[in-house]
Amino acid sequence: MKGLLKFITCGSVDDGKSTLIGHILYDSKLLYADQEKALELDSRVGSRSGKIDYSLLLDGLMAEREQGITIDVAYRYFTTDRRSFIVADTPGHEEYTRNMAVGASFADLAVILIDASQGVLVQTRRHARICSLMGIKYFIFAVNKMDIVDYSEERFNEIKVQIDELTKELSLPNIQIIPLSATEGDNVTKKSENIKWYTGPALLTYLENIDISDHDEQGFYMPVQRVCRPDRTFRGFQGQIESGSISVGDEITALPSGEKASVKGILVTDKEAQTAYKGQPVTVSLDKEVDVSRGCVLVKDTDIGVYKRLKASILWMDDEELVIGKDYLVKLGTKTISGILSGVEYAVDVNTGEHIKTDKLSKNGIALCDIILTEAIPADKFTSHKTMGELILIDRVTNMTSACGVVEELSERGGSAADRASFKLGDLTARGDIFEEFFYDTSSLNVLKYQPVNSTYTVGDEIPTSGESYNYPDSFDIIVLRDWVAVKVRDKKITEIISAEEYSYGGYPVINGRGFGVKAYSDNDVKTFLKEYSESTEEEKSGFFEKWVRFDEYRKVILKSDRK
């Protein structure tokens, strides 16, 4: 028996998507007796003169039945002797394109229906383009309602030419074209006597036998969904493995920090395991403390990087037009972060595929856009690592999903912890967020970070104690909690870089690694500060910083309207 196949049915309004799936379920004897009886009774008061209306099996909403269209995405699970299936029956009406895109995001294969009497329509092209955008590699073009055109081979060939043109335009791989009639059952579950000129398989036969090759992505990666810390003795990172495998003893890298650690233990559900594989939800514990929270990614043997600028192909789903310069929430992987939609490279004419220069995009439009994030996050091209290259934009005011899309290009790469370390002495390295500038962008109404200093300082070096958005004393101490390192600065020069455990208070102001003042005025204060940090859970961190940190002592936010 072949593996599970997840597929979507889509096409224009009234192309017969619900009827097609309903007929498969009915013919394959996949209904309970009461479902079959209810279908026959409902059909008697329907629109087919008492004949069975197979679409009623899927069009469950009253609004759908009244209008004769699908509004929501209807998911159905069914099994034949050869295979198990999950099918998403999606809306055909343009108004519900966003619902259709949701269905496409989960599928391996798309069945795109075409009305034989109408041929390829604009909505057919839009759905094919969205399916391709969402990464679907396998397509069946089902030329439906062949009974209406008297099963004409000539008409089928005319439509086949239109499909071939669309296939070339979108560079669609793995295409199958099947003539059928969803209402009469021709070529749905078995070969039709009415379409003898077609020598290919029936739809269900093709679905049962097609091999969906799963593209193996490079290396191991797991977006962190949650940090699990039930007590002070255990800290685990939970998520689903999206590619590759991980074993106890493997060295992994945590992004975006770039810190490395070895896998100490793996839990699959509540059972210990030596190795875990793609698709498994796991809890991974490491042999040392690293800077990891929800939205970070654990990787091994992969080139997934950390980036601040993305170029993404998006489907605009909001009723309001796209606004260049507006601040949106960007959700990529398990990370949600503020970002600015900084420009539209071009919009795509759905009918012709032409690239159109514009700075606007309305509902159901498709375009290539530039997005600037407030800070660098783990990401990759959709074609390389799917989960790290698919995103949605969320309106910060309405909380509505404004767009979905995939990453095409990346730029302004962020470095690893070692690359970005501002302080280094031997094996000790610490990030220098104290040099990071904070700007308030008046066009996006958002605080952006910008780090102009890329130098790494060691003992004896002079550091810049003032910038546009920060001003520190000439002599002070820095405790970088994430790296557990303390740095002593006297007269603007670094005099000592030591482990935080070795640090003792010397009467000078103390700041944390982000440049905020610490309310520590004695050695006892410092020891309590470090102890409470090491014992606090991720959920307790915000309370910890509120207790210990003065946010406005050495830093301020500078107004900028054109900062990139």
Image (cartoon, rainbow, N blue to C red):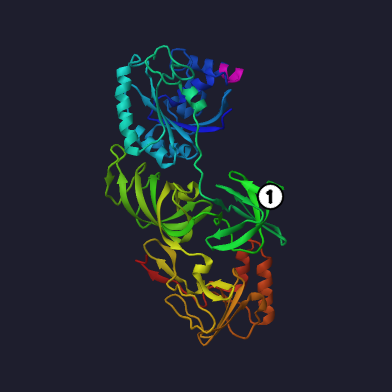
Task: Please name the predominant secondary structure of the magenta segment in the image.
Answer: helix
Q: Position of residue 268 (x, y in %)?
A: 67, 47
Specify few, some or many for label 1: CA neighbours under 10 Å numbering under 14, 14-19, or 20 or more: some
Q: Nearer the viewer, residue 272 or 375?
A: 272
Which quarter of the rendered picture does the N terminus lie within? top right
The answer to whether residue 257 is magenta is: no
Q: Is residue 248 left or right of residue 105?
A: right
Q: Position of residue 450 (x, y in %)?
A: 43, 68
Compared to residue 253, the image places residue 215 above or below, namely above
Q: Which residues are magenta?
A: 31-36
Kindly identify the residue that appears in the image at 48 percent across and 65 percent down.
415
Q: Nearer the viewer, residue 268 or 72?
A: 268
Q: Position of residue 414 (x, y in %)?
A: 46, 63
The answer to whether residue 33 is magenta is: yes
Q: Which residue is mark 1?
A: 274
Which quarter of the rendered picture does the C terminus lie within? bottom left
Q: Position of residue 89 (x, y in %)?
A: 47, 30
Compared to residue 528, the image places residue 75 above or below, namely above
Kindly identify the residue that appears in the image at 34 percent across and 13 percent down.
150
Q: Secondary structure at mark 1?
A: loop
